[in-house]
Image: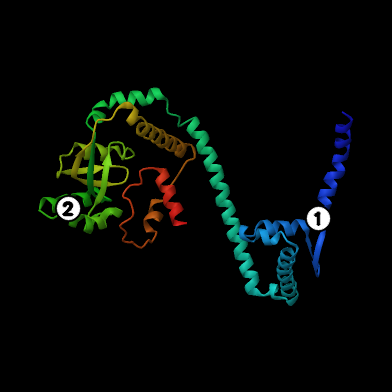
Amino acid sequence: MLKNKIVLSALPFLLFACSKGQNQVVAKAGQIRITTKDLMAEIQNSPDAYKTYLSTLEGKKQFLDILLREKILVNAAERSGVSRMKEIQQNLKDYRERMKEQETEYRKGLVLREYLRQLKDKDLKVEEADIKKYYEDHKADYANPVRVTAAHILSTTEADAQAVLKRLKAGDAFDKVARELSTDPSADRGGLIGEVAKGDLSDIPEFESALFSLKAGQISGIVKTKIGYHVIRKVGEIKLPEQTYEQAAAQIHRVLEKKKFDEWVDKSKKEQKVWVDEKALAALPVDKIQSKTVPAYPESEEMMSESKEKVK
């Protein structure tokens, strides 16, 4: 017991001694001081291959000399007045603005991740009972699942869509008309949007319903969605093995969660009184870029986030 009391009473002095040792000045260069703490931090950041040499006195001396050379250069540069040059001041200003933007983006990312986590646990929460009900209601789709290859031609107005149908009925090739008239990014691929399964295009249910009602090679009439006016072609179809509830549960969870998210967004738009000036939007000049990597429809907000990360 006495021994413990002695150790406890000595603890503040030991901490003070360690702190003092860390702040001990080992070298000076003008007004700049290098403490043992500074030196150790630099040594710890050096490559592991040099650590053995740096554990020796000669190694520490050489390393400290390198640091001093840098400090001497910094002192001389500061005294020279270079830092007052317009170019330097402008670069510093630009740097501070970039750092501010990065901090804003970083903060936004942190807040969004935490809020989405909370949202998934509350408003977007999908119960197992909901997944089972969805599976039972769509059991035929899972007993005979298919994946179809689709293409489409997107028009802004119904009149433009009628012109598309007229050319197709006259015998023009679908891919040719798509390249010439479609306003969708898939135009340069002849309207091809690739393979989709039921639920992949749940955000445009009219499109999905029309697509899966077609036979292979068949072309639809005009299908109106929130995106515009479509003429759809079912290029082909692949039959897949039957899916049990266990196999389909994860996909159903994603479908139901996205449905809840879309409903939450629509509700939030009304609450926040979202308004868009479509005339100003239409007049915004954007050069068309031919690209074979842009998806016709991002399947989820996660895909859009991944695209942004790739751009960065």
Task: Residue at the far bottom: name it.
Answer: 80
Residue type at mark 1?
A: Asn
Which residue carries the number 1 mark?
23
Q: Residues within 10 Å of mark 1 (few under 14, many from 20)?
A: some
Instruction: Determine the residue positioned at 21% across, 45% down.
Output: 232
Asked if residue 21 is positioned above or below residue 9 in the image, the reply reads: below
Residue 166 image position (x, y, % from top left):
14, 51
Residue 293 image position (x, y, % from top left):
33, 55
Q: Depth check: give the residue in front, 132 or 211.
A: 132
Instruction: Determine the residue positioned at 83% across, 45% down.
Output: 15
Asked if residue 131 is positioned above or below residue 111 in the image, the reply reads: above
Quarter assignment of residue 14? top right
Q: Depth check: give the residue in front, 11 or 134.
A: 11
Which residue carries the number 2 mark?
174
> Can residue 220 be seen?
yes
Q: Residues within 10 Å of mark 2 (few under 14, many from 20)?
A: many
Total of numbered circles in the picture? 2
Q: Depth check: give the residue in front, 262 or 1.
A: 1
Q: Nearer the viewer, mark 1 or mark 2?
A: 1
Residue 36 image position (x, y, % from top left):
78, 58
Q: Secondary structure at mark 1?
A: loop
Q: Secondary structure at mark 2?
A: helix
Quarter assignment of residue 282? bottom left
Q: Which mark is residue 5?
A: none
Residue type at mark 2?
A: Phe
> Can residue 276 be seen?
no
Asked if residue 224 is positioned above or below residue 308 in the image, the reply reads: above
Quarter containing the N terminus: top right
Q: CA distance from mark 1 to mark 2?
A: 76 Å
